[in-house]
Amino acid sequence: MKLDLDRIWVTVFAGDAELGLREDEVAVAAWEKVGMPPERIVRLPRADNFWSVGGPGPCGPDSEMFYDWGEEVGCGRDQCQPGCDCDRFLEFWNLVFMEFELHADGSLTPLPKQNIDTGLGLERGARILQGVDSVYDTDGYQQIMAWLAAESGVGYGESDQATKAHRILADHGRGMTFLAADGVTPSNEGRGYVMRRIIRRAVQQAGRIGLEQTVQGLGLEPGGLEQSLGCPAGWCRQGDVLGPGAQDGEDGVEQRGLADAGAAGDHQQLRAQRQAHRFALAGGQDQA
């Protein structure tokens, strides 16, 4: 990523008396070995730097990487560092050292097979690389929001309501597309119920920026959405991003989501699924 290393801070587990664990000296030593200055290695308590499933189960200390946006966006305190509630530091990478099993009585035992679970926040990483104020200002979201503005006549940032609607529609529309590509359809249970609720919230926000007629006016014929938009290809064709479920292309995602919503007789779901797919197409225009 070629980040400015002077802007990188890390946090490590400070230890916890209740768990009977001391400071994670192994993580501290590892960071110092790769050149992290000791003053930018911050010890934080269990609430910040210990991962668990929320109860009995696998768990372990973690270490997090933060990007420093600079003193000018911070709280101004001399003690400002990762863990502060201000906006200066952005966590973008996490490493969980899955070492223990937490039991119902609060005791820990070592896991027979230990591992490191690590990952980067995609949008947070994009925000850092693009130097923008929020994840919603990154190019992936802005492509969708540009289409929303063109269709509704209401731009992102025009008002608090417009900003909220754009963010929800862009985020939920993308989420629906991923769910549909994975074979999920609206239902009353499990992942299908999550999808149904996401759809309904998106429809509500679409109406608030004047997109309701656009949603109602879309057709159901396979390929019709792409033709009506004039898009050369949709987001769903990016099988390497969306996964095996997207290999059927736009029509497969459209039929899985739209047909099932229509069969359920829930017109609100139906309209939102159409809208979600148009988001996917708009977002993929420059990425195909």
Image (cartoon, helix red, strand yellow):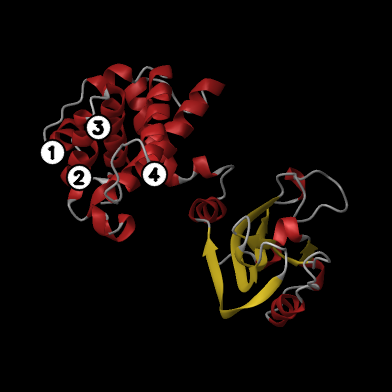
**Which residue sits at x=24%, y=38%?**
257
- Residue type, mark 1 in image: Gly
- State left or right for residue 281 relative to residue 230: right
CA–CA distance between discs 2 and 1?
7 Å
**Type of amino acid at the residue the image marks with label 2:** Glu
Which residue in the protein does label 4 denote?
190
Closer to us: 253 or 282: 253
Q: In this view, does 52 lie to the left or right of 148?
A: right
The image position of residue 237, as x and y in percent, is 23, 52
| Viewer-nearest of discs 3 and 4 | 4
Element at label 1: loop
Whichever of labels 3 and 2 marks the residue nearer the N terminus, that label is 2
Task: Identify the mark nearer the N-term, 1 or 4.
Answer: 4
Q: Judge depth for marks 4 and 2 and give the one in front.
A: 4
* Secondary structure category for the residue under label 2: helix
Q: Which label sits in the foreground, 3 or 1?
A: 3
Circle 3/circle 4 CB separation < 8 Å: no
Rendering coords of residue 60 (x, y %): 65, 69
Side (left or right) of 245 relative to 86: left
What residue is pinned by disc 1? Answer: 223
Give residue 32's quadrant in the image.
bottom right
- Horizontally, residue 28 falls left or right of residue 209, namely right
- The image shows residue 139 at horizontal and vertical percentages of 43, 45
Tell me the residue at 24%/20% (across/down).
Answer: 216
Query: Where is mark 3, residue-wise?
Result: 261
CA separation in Å, label 3 and label 2: 16 Å
Q: Name the kind of residue labelled 3 in the image.
A: Ala
Q: Find disc 2 in the rendering and name its residue.
A: 250
